[in-house]
Amino acid sequence: MGQFLCGASRPGHFDGVTSVVTRLFLACRPHLAIFGQKDAQQLAILRRMTRELGFGTEVVGHPIVREKDGLAMSSRNRYLSPEERAQAVVLSRSLFAVSHAAGQGERSADALRALMRETIGAAPEARIDYAEIVDADTLRPADTLAPEGASGERYLAAVAVFVGDTRLIDNVTLVVRDAG
């Protein structure tokens, strides 16, 4: 799971994360651990690790907290110049556009990726690291968003974008339900 999304440009990062969290869980044996949904890849990896190692810890994702204009709150936002900060909202705009398109029936992951790239491309200071649609559980890139079962299939629209020299991440969960 660590080879996709952020793992592609940060080899070994999630090995370090899982090592630290494993030691923490072994030291304090928590019943509950809360991690931010903004780093959805880390959350998915830690959920799987916790389940596979049988820690008995419930891993809960805390919803993304957003500024009034939609930008996901992050300590990295402080590194943005005022002009870069104004352009950084393209991350959330791209995700909201994809969420809307998927809600309206768009099922082509390539079309959704193109929509994200086009939206982000409107900001001159933005350079895309990735704009991806993945299965929310495996983090593998998706081809087609297909409903599965009564609860629907879950996908993740995720972006990592450099705005100036600052790398920002954001994501939104897409739930695809059968029209019938």
Image: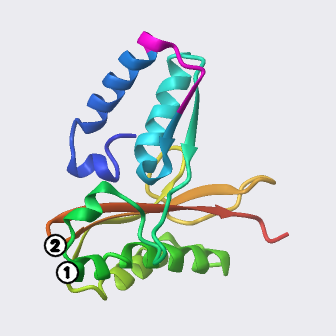
For marks 1 and 2, the one nearer the N-term is 1
Q: Is residue 30 magenta?
A: yes
Q: Which residue is mark 2?
A: 164
97 in relation to 30, above or below = below
Q: Quadrant of residue 91?
A: bottom left
Q: Is residue 97 left or right of residue 16?
A: right
Work out whether residue 126 or residue 156 is closer to the camera in this orientation and state it: 126
Question: What is the three-letter code of the residue carrying label 1?
Answer: Glu
Query: Which residues, given as a range, are shown in magenta?
Result: 26-33
Locate residue 92, reporting x and y percent. 44, 73
Locate residue 122, reporting x and y percent. 31, 88
91 in relation to 32, above or below = below
Q: Going by the picture, which residue comes out furthest to the right?
A: 180
Residue at figure coordinates x 23%, y 79% from the top left:
82
Question: What is the three-letter code of the residue carrying label 2?
Answer: Gly
Q: Which residue is mark 1?
A: 125
Image quadrant occupied by the N terminus: top left
Residue at figure coordinates x 85%, y 69% from the top left:
180
| CA neighbours of label 1 inside 10 A, class few (<14), some (14 to 19), many (20+) | some
Q: Is residue 5 left or right of residue 97?
A: left
Asked whether the beta carbons under mark 1 and mark 2 sit within 8 Å of each other, the answer is yes
